[in-house]
Amino acid sequence: MRTKIIFSLLCSFILLQLAAQKTIAIKCGSLLDTKSGQVLQNQTILVKDNKIESVVATKSFIQKTDSIIDLSSYFVLPGLIDCHTHVLLQADITSEDYDVQILKESIPYRTIRAVKSCYQSIQNGFTTIRDLGTEGAGFADVDLKKAINKNEMIGPRMFVSTLAINTTGHYPIKASDYAWQLQLPKGLQEITGADEARRAVRSQIEHGADWIKIYADRSYYKIADGSYRGLPNFTTEEINAIGDETIRSRKKLAAHAMTRDGIIAAINAGARTIEHGTGMDDECIKLMVDKKIFWCPTLFVNEFVADGRAKAGSIINKQFTETIPATFKKAIAAGVKLAYGTDIGGYAWNLSQAKDFEYFVQWGLTPVQAIQTATTTAAELLEQQGLIGEIKSGAYADIIAVKGDPTKDVKLLQQVQWVMKDGMVYKSEKK
Ligand SMILES: [Zn+2]
């Protein structure tokens, strides 16, 4: 008798679950298979809850669904992935812009602004981000990620790195810009020595870091032969301690590194991604290819800050602007793995998050290859292959649509008209 009651309770529970599962058919005009690079016509995506159940030709789709979304006059592709963002930053051309945010805005106020950045990312069609450092806003990125996952607010899937790490005295806010008796906040966690390095990694992971972010070099300059150098921030013991602690915790290391002085040390310490890398040389390129290191070149942000910083006395970003096209072409020809990362937050969140695609195409990638940097390759960087960056059975229902064909004109990605994340529609400007 008791078994029978339990069995019938179980059956009704399962039935309730089935009834709660929502199905949506999305009829697509064109659909990009990001894996093969093929554009398919007249496909229908079956979404069940937050996952994609199947993708079939519209003419052979017979299943009854709870609702139908007609995107038959649109070009459909997976939600885009930005591997380098700062939701807690609102553009910093000069050091003063940066200091004002940290000194005059409380962390709760900055977090409120970040809620808006997260919403903006979704509106831009970027349904997943790797946020690389809170710039003095503590562990607020972990809270934002939690709030998004609990549906308290609208935002992308987040992979977070919390405070980021540099060595003592090498990151804003710069003490010498202020009265020395002040105890100023810092834009990240400072360490000195291998023990403090290990402590920082352990503490950040304890607080919820998915990635560890380091700043590997600073004070960049151009030398007579046209190449770039910088000052390494860490001793070999410090950077290796960070890499070792990160890898042993099964986490991944992302390194801000502009020149060989940061890039080579970071890769040798176990970094999986090089951020910016703007002043890389042939040896860096070779090492990145050999070790299959991902490169997030963050191109638009460099141009965004170049003039303002030149006016404030630093011409390095202007110099980078002149040499980056050739460096980019050389790195791509050599086979460096290119992943899409913008550094948005370093530039204003109301500017385009899809601007870097334009540079990629201008400097030799096909539009499909450019889109792959923000879909399949970015998913590989995040070890989320098959779950994001593709429209296929078993993937999350993160889907976007644009008018026109972005495989012919990549600029169209700057005007995403329809966005679904996790099976929920967050933007619909369909006409
Ligand atoms: Zn950054």
Image: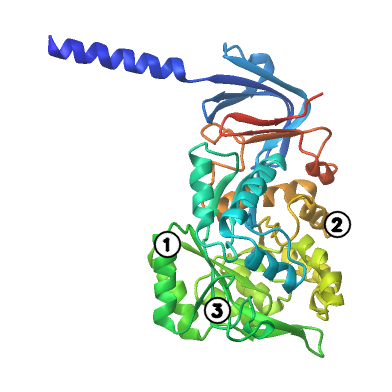
Which residue is under mark 3? 183
Q: Earlier in the sequence, mark 1 or mark 3?
A: 3
423, 74: nearer the viewer = 423
Between marks 1 and 3 in the image, the one whose residue lies nearer the viewer: 3
For the residue pair 349 and 198, the one nearer the viewer reads as 349
Of the pair 279 and 310, the residue shown nearer to us: 310
Measured as percent of width and height from the top left, residue 260 is found at 66, 80
Where is residue 256? Give x, y as percent: 62, 70
Which badge, 2 or 3, comes first in the chain's sequence? Answer: 3
Q: Residue furthest bottom?
A: 224
Which of the two discs, 2 and 1, labels the residue nearer the N terminus? 1
Mark 2 → mark 3, Cα distance in angstroms: 47 Å
Please name the colour scheme applied to the rendered image: rainbow
Figure quadrant of residue 425? top right
Q: Nearer the viewer, mark 2 or mark 3?
A: 3
Q: Quadrant of the C terminus?
A: top right
Q: Which of marks 2 and 1 is in front?
A: 1
Neighbour tally class for label 1: few under 14, some 14-19, many 20 plus, Cα within 10 Å: some
- Tell me which image quadrant ligand 1 sits in: bottom right
The residue identified by callout 1 is 205
In this rendering, the answer to whether 12 lies above or below 304 is: above
Instruction: Please identify the quadrant where the N terminus is shown.
Output: top left
Relative horizontal placement of residue 122, taking residue 396 as reference (left or right) = right
